[in-house]
């Protein structure tokens, strides 16, 4: 939605957000075409909300991130993020970082150290890790010579379920970022995995996240 309409939508929806829930707003379109967020845009949003007695916990920016896997080598603009967070400091709001899959540990540590980011969204990398797909430090899945994901076979989803997932993805044209949509149609399969295997999946995700 255009910047003049997005705050109005937030104001209209806010009464339905329970007090115990964290509230995050977003400035600009993630991976959009209208350029990166600015101090002025972020201040406008927060000032409008505060004037209506709404105090978001986080603000997400269009700061160079993408939804899915970042492979451009540029990605999140840490300096811009720090600049906007500094401008917002009187309003006591933290940064919510979208699209951290595909950014390596050094980049994430730089963001944590140099900005007011306290929340990071990551999905695809953790899905790959939990399924026991080989990934690099960026969370990007490694591919074999035929361009297919490399299933390590020891843990994660079973070979039988993985075969079904690959067949479903192929039949529905799910490639790259699209494979994250496999979680919904295969939710019951994943929940029905033996407890010991699910605990290993959980531990793998925990260790990757901690690193």
Image (cartoon, rainbow, N blue to C red):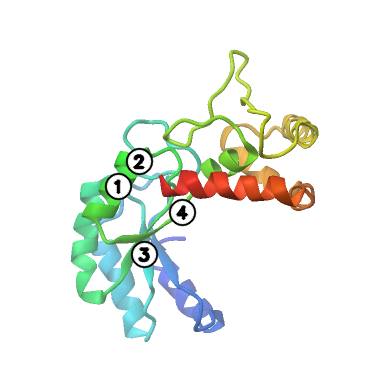
- Frontmost of labels 2 and 3 is 2
- Where disc 2 sits, the SS reads helix
Q: Nearer the viewer, residue 53 or 159?
A: 159
Residue at label 1? 109
Nearer mark to the viewer, of 4 and 3: 4
Expressed as whole percent of the image width and height from the top left, the position of residue 107 reads: 31, 41
Which residue lies under the disc numbered 3?
59
Name the N-terminal-most of marks 4 and 3: 3
Where 132 sits versus 67, above or below? above
Q: Nearer the viewer, mark 4 or mark 2?
A: 2
Q: Check if mark 2's residue and mark 1's residue have beta carbons within 8 Å.
A: yes
Q: Find residue 183 and report its horizontal and vertical position in percent.
A: 68, 47
Instruction: Indicate whether 140 appears above or below 203.
Output: above
How many angstroms separate mark 2 from mark 1 (CA)?
Answer: 6 Å
Mark yes or no: residue 206 visible. Answer: yes
**Which residue sits at x=67%, y=32%?**
154
Q: Which residue is mark 4?
A: 121
- For residue 141, side relative to residue 182 (left or right): left
Judge whether 18 appears above or below 150 on screen. below
Question: Residue at image x 60%, y 19%?
Answer: 147
Mark nearest the camera among 1 and 4 is 1
Q: Which residue is mark 2?
A: 105
Dividing the picture into quadrants, the one containing residue 174 is top right
Callout 4: helix, strand or loop?
Answer: loop
């Amino acid at each position: 939605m255009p910047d003049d309409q997005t705050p109005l939508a937030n104001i209209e929806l806010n009464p339905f957000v329970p007090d115990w829930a964290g509230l995050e707003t977003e400035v600009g379109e993630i991976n959009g075409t209208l350029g990166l967020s600015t101090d002025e845009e972020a201040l406008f949003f927060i000032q409008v909300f505060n004037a209506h007695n709404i105090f978001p916990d986080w603000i997400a920016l269009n700061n160079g991130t993408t939804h899915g896997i970042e492979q451009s080598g540029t990605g999140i603009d840490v300096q811009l993020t720090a600049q906007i967070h500094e401008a917002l400091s009187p309003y006591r709001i933290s940064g919510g970082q979208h699209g951290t899959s595909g950014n390596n540990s050094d980049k994430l540590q730089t963001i944590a150290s140099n900005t007011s980011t306290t929340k990071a969204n990551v999905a695809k990398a953790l899905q790959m890790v939990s399924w026991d797909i080989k990934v690099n430090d960026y969370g990007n899945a490694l591919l074999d010579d035929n361009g297919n994901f490399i299933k390590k076979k020891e843990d994660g989803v079973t070979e039988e379920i993985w075969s079904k997932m690959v067949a479903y993805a192929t039949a529905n044209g799910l490639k790259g970022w699209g494979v994250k949509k496999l979680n919904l149609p295969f939710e019951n399969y994943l929940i029905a995995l033996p407890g010991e295997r699910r605990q290993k999946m959980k531990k793998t995700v925990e260790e990757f996240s901690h690193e």
